Image (tube, rainbow, N blue to C red):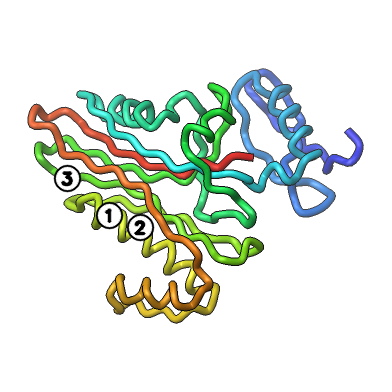
Amino acid sequence: MSGLPELVTTELGDGPARYPLPGNGPGPTLVRAAPRGAGAAFLRYWEEALKQPSIFVPKKIFLTGGVGVHRERLSAFEMALRDANIARYNLVNVSSIFPPHCELIERKEGLEHLTPGQITFAVMSRLDTNEPSRLVASSIGVAIPKDPDQFGYLSEHHEYGQNERVAGDYAEDLAASMLATILGVPFNSDTAWDEQRAQWEVSGKIVRTLNVTQTAEGPEDGKWVSVVTAAVLLP
């Protein structure tokens, strides 16, 4: 246990368990509740994680999306996750940074790095409806800087009544806008998207923008439809 931060004792369902969470230095750190009976496994996980701090900086990312239909809303979401090929993992939502030196890979390759049940971090967007013919859209936008030492941005967007092109362009431009503000690229929220994008390209600081978007219409029989898109982060 040497080298680990001070362990903090907390009460779990089956008695006290002691485990660290990574912090910025020695001493007590934050404690997060663990499921009943999970104390030992949780401790082992963090012991290994603390030996490899770089595990918390993703090295690869892949994009995916899916749609699901069911009479139950939650089940429709499950069907959408299955369609996106990420239902078998324990997904943890995170915020929207594209890490430095991170590689964008194809979904097929990304799935080869995952194991069923694995805790998997993702930037995810979702929208549901059971209103017949109502259009729903979910999108993830990506903006990658030219400098590999600089982080980029991932944006989440979901909206009713937007088709794939409109929702995708909005998410993509949102990610690029956030990146532009930290790179010093001229940005004006009132400027038309196409004109703004041209300015970003001329600056040479934003090398690539893209999106993954999923749309669907509410079924006529009143069932729920769910659309989901995600950027899955891999160690």
Reply above or below: 50 against 171: above
Q: Position of residue 41 (x, y in %)?
A: 70, 23
Disc 3 element: strand
Q: Determine which residue is flagged by label 1.
A: 167
Crowding near the residue tagged with mark 1, few <14, some 14–19, many ≥20 C-alpha atoms within 10 Å: many
Q: CA distance from mark 2 to mark 1?
A: 6 Å
Circle 1/circle 3 CB separation < 8 Å: no
Q: CA distance from mark 1 to mark 3?
A: 11 Å
In the foreground, 117 or 198? 198
Q: Tell me how far mark 3 sits from mark 2, CA to CA.
A: 17 Å
Choose the circle earlier in sequence order: 1 or 3: 3
Q: Residue at x 88, y 33 (%)?
A: 1
- Residue at label 3? 135
Instruction: Return the x and y of residue 82 as percentages of the image width and height.
Output: 37, 26
Q: Which mark is on residue 171?
A: 2
Q: Amino acid at mark 1?
A: Ala
In this picture, residue 53 sits left or right of residue 26: left
For numbered disc 2, what is the local secondary structure? helix
Do labels 2 and 1 touch, CB within 8 Å?
A: yes
Q: Secondary structure at mark 1?
A: helix
